[in-house]
Amino acid sequence: MKTIIILNLFAILCFSGLSAQTLDPESLLTIQNWKDKNSEKISGYSVSTQKDFNQVQYRSDEDVLDSLHTWTWDTLFVQWQLIRRTIYTSDENNNVISELNLFWESGQWINESFYTYSYDDNNNITGYQFQVWNGTVWENSEQTLYTYDDHNNQTSITDQNWDGSNWVNSLRRLFTYDDHDKQVDIVYEHWTGTDWQGVFHHIFTYDVDHRLIHRLIQNWNNGWVDNQQIMYSYDLNNDLDMDSLQRWVTDHWEDYYRNFYTYDAHHNRTEYLRQLHIGGGVWEDEQRFFFTYDLNDDITSQLYQTYTNGQWVNFYQFLVTNDENRNRITEVFQIWDGTWVNQDSFQYYYTLATGTKDILPDPFDITVYPNPASSSLEIQLSDFSQEEMTIEIYSDNGILQMKSGISPLTNKSIDISGLASGEYHVMIRTGKGLVVKNFVKF
């Protein structure tokens, strides 16, 4: 059995930034597929710079995760404090079929939440169901269903919520592919109560080498209306060296941001630089990431800096080590406060076996609604509503959009009217730890 210490916040923040930091452009075709299929369920949240995002993993195919322990850094006693654990079971194909989440309280483990997973004959996940513990029995909360074509391409994802007696539709994503199994179209829809209504439409274009060169994003407004577009370019090694995003304003496209990427000789991404367009053809540095790797090309660190008052300033970093089997054995998240300060950590336990899917739980029983949302977002906590919370909202490419603190007994409502339409990740910190939720702003 092997022990691995991995940071909680690392898992959340890195995943939020993956689309901008670590993705080969072709994997953008399946980013939403992967995220919906595996996000909040798969431990591949952790930072990676592998070219194919669908191959993101933090352990070898020879090891199976059987339990996970979560720790938080106690600044008073200057030590790690155990707060949670997750127990996994797998089927004969080493697919995780259940995970039980417990929290540590008064010297004992208390039930918190429970996931179950199902798969088809090709080991594609076909559904998961999430339940919460009410003190006596498990109660249904939400579930997601998946379908595939004959090539194992995911064709639909449907989210449903439990209303006390029935499963009720919430969100749906529909995917189409070309003859090369490249994703050419994604339609996002939400359930109105009687039928499905369009929200977003993504259209992908490729060059003759089947590389993604253009992504058009449209919103529904009694028809599909252009909203954003992303253009991609490549270096001589076929690595993505730049992508740029423009927004549709009235009758023309306007530059918004652009990203530059550099690589080492093994095609590992070593730097990602983002610039914002401030007008008149002038670009201004905003943020950058640095990555390092070991001899197996597995990532060993990520440093994030922001450009503030004309200089680069440290913000956070992740430090990672891997064992001889390429399992991630330590992962520490630190924030910069004049010096690097520890935050939270995970401790994973493995048993040797054949490969399994990387599945990670949703840490707490927290509800974010409505979803989609237009002007405000409500945060509902079941068993620790009197706690102070810090709320951070990140864009789908990992950029911090909003941050606020919420005191006990106050209305846990966030004004999101100023956010642009799109997908977002909500990071919620309480005294019991961290959780990430997703929502759509329209």
Image (cartoon, rainbow, N blue to C red):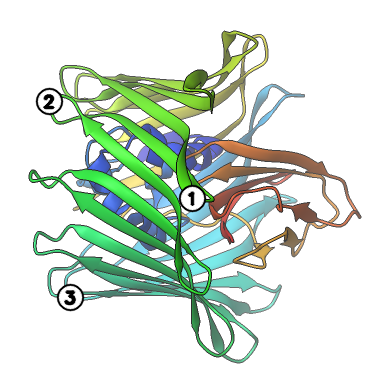
- Tell me the residue that label 1 is attached to: 251
Asked if the residue under mark 2 is in contact with the one under mark 3, i.e. CB atoms within 8 Å, the reply is no
Disc 1 secondary structure class: loop
User: Which of the two labelled residues, at mark 1 and mark 3, occupies the earlier sequence position?
Assistant: 3
Along the line of sight, which residue is nearer the eye, 235 or 108?
235
User: Which numbered mark, 3 or 2, is in the foreground of this view?
Assistant: 2
Q: Is residue 199 left or right of residue 60?
A: right
**Image location (x, y in percent) of residue 186:** 34, 64
Q: Is residue 419 left or right of residue 38?
A: right
- When asked about the image quadrant of residue 180, the answer is bottom left
Q: Residues within 10 Å of mark 2 (few under 14, many from 20)?
A: few
The residue lying at 87 percent from left, 46 percent from top is 407
**Of the numbered discs in the image, which one, if any, rests on residue 390?**
none
- When asked about the image quadrant of residue 8, the answer is top right
Q: Is residue 337 in sight in this rendering?
A: yes
- Mark 3 to mark 2: distance in Å? 37 Å
- Tell me the residue that label 2 is attached to: 237
Disc 3 secondary structure class: loop
Residue furthest front as drawn: 251
- Tell me the residue that label 3 is attached to: 121
Q: Is residue 212 left or right of residue 108?
A: left
Q: Quadrant of the N terminus?
A: top left
User: Which of the two labelled residues, at mark 3 and mark 2, occupies the earlier sequence position?
Assistant: 3
- Mark 1 to mark 3: distance in Å? 49 Å
- Mark 2 to mark 1: distance in Å? 37 Å
